[in-house]
Image (spheres, rainbow, N blue to C red):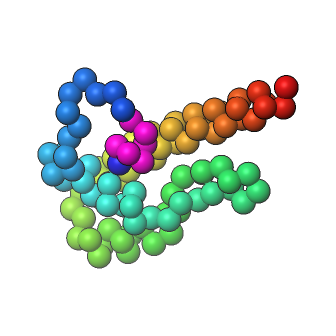
Amino acid sequence: MVEQMGWTDFDDEPLEPGDLPISAQQALILMNVLPDKVEGMSGVWLGKEYSGLSDIMTIYQMIDWKETFEMLQVCIEEYSKYYDEQRKQAERKSKSKMR
């Protein structure tokens, strides 16, 4: 996830997924399994598609669904901030090329 998010500056070493609580580990599984929702024309990332979420949680035998879902929301919020910043940078870059 470090490379995917483009993080480069850490105060401490990044945690390994196995160091996280089980609900956080399960949220990361969901982030990888659930498909992305992307706006068709602009390609803006809208989040994750939740259809089939309960089936996936059942298949993976997830324990505390509520806590795992809350952790998933935190992951989605962080990804959203990252992709929004990437989009803004791309817009600024394209505007500067037009000048």
- Where are the magenta residues, as a range? 2-7
Please name the residue shown 60% across and 51% down the image.
46
Q: Quadrant of residue 98?
A: top right
Q: Is residue 72 above or below residue 86?
A: below
Q: Any magenta on residue 4?
A: yes
Please tell me which residue lies in front, 68 or 45: 45
Residue 38 position by quadrant:
bottom right
- Answer with left or right where residue 72 lies relative to residue 36: left
Residue extending furthest toward the right? 99
From the viewer's side, name the closer residue of 56 and 82. Answer: 82
Query: Where does the image place residue 54, in percent across and percent down from the top left?
Result: 38, 69
| Residue 83 or residue 71, whichever sits in front | 83
Of residues 3 and 20, the one drawn nearer to the viewer in this rendering: 3
Position of 91 relative to 40 (above/below): above
Is residue 10 rendered to the left or right of residue 37?
left
Q: Where does the image place residue 50, in percent across and percent down from the top left?
A: 49, 63
Q: Main secondary structure of the magenta part?
A: helix
Q: Is residue 17 above or below residue 52?
A: above
Residue at image x 38%, y 35%? 7
Q: Horizontal placement of 47 versus 42: left or right? A: left
Residue at 15% from the left image edge and 51% from the top image edge: 18
Q: Residue, x 54% and y 52% (percent of image)?
A: 47
Look at the image and tell me in which quarter the C terminus lies: top right
Q: Is residue 49 visible?
A: yes
Residue 29: x and y in percent read 32, 60
Q: Is 35 displayed left or right of 67 in the figure?
A: right
In magenta stretch: residue 48? no
Instruction: Please count the marks in the image.
Output: 0
Residue 70 visible at all: no
* Quarter of the view holding residue 37: bottom right
| Residue 68 x, y percent position in the rendering | 30, 53
